[in-house]
Amino acid sequence: MLKELLKDEEGQSTVEYMLLISVIVIAIVAAAFVFIEPFRAGVEDLGKDIKKILSDGKIGRVGTTR
């Protein structure tokens, strides 16, 4: 029975997969932390552009004046 327990590597591979998943999650969280501010600023700029387009009726110099 002890020899079978030592040969069984299923638990070990599960631990390895969990460690790999945890490293991937940490990398995703770190990337989100780095890119959240530029993303938020971009979304705010996009919102301002859409608000201006909807109020002016123009995209750049193309469109009709309201």
Image (cartoon, rainbow, N blue to C red):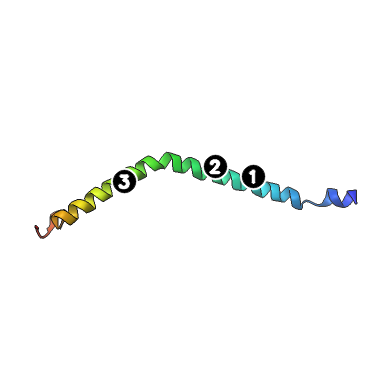
Query: In the rendered view of the protein, which quadrant contains the C terminus?
Result: bottom left
Q: Quadrant of residue 54?
A: bottom left
Residue contact between numbered discs 1 and 2, judged by CB atoms under 8 Å = no
Q: Earlier in the sequence, mark 1 or mark 2?
A: 1
Q: Residues within 10 Å of mark 1 (few under 14, many from 20)?
A: few
Residue occupying the far left of the picture: 65
Whole-percent x, y for residue 40 in the image: 34, 44
Q: Amino acid at mark 1?
A: Leu
Above/below status of 30 relative to 60: above
Q: Amino acid at mark 3?
A: Gly
Is residue 64 left or right of 13 when viewed as pictured?
A: left
Question: Residue at (23%, 48%) from the top-left corner?
Answer: 48
Between the residue at mark 1 and the residue at mark 2, the CA separation in whole angstroms equals: 11 Å
Residue 19 bears which disc, if any?
1
Q: Earlier in the sequence, mark 2 or mark 3?
A: 2
Residue for badge 2:
26
Q: Amino acid at mark 2?
A: Ile
Question: Residue at (66%, 49%) from the top-left corner?
Answer: 17
Residue 42 bears which disc, if any?
3
Q: Identify the element where label 1 is drawn.
A: helix
Q: Identify the element where label 3 is drawn.
A: helix
Question: Residue at (58%, 43%) from the top-left corner?
Answer: 23
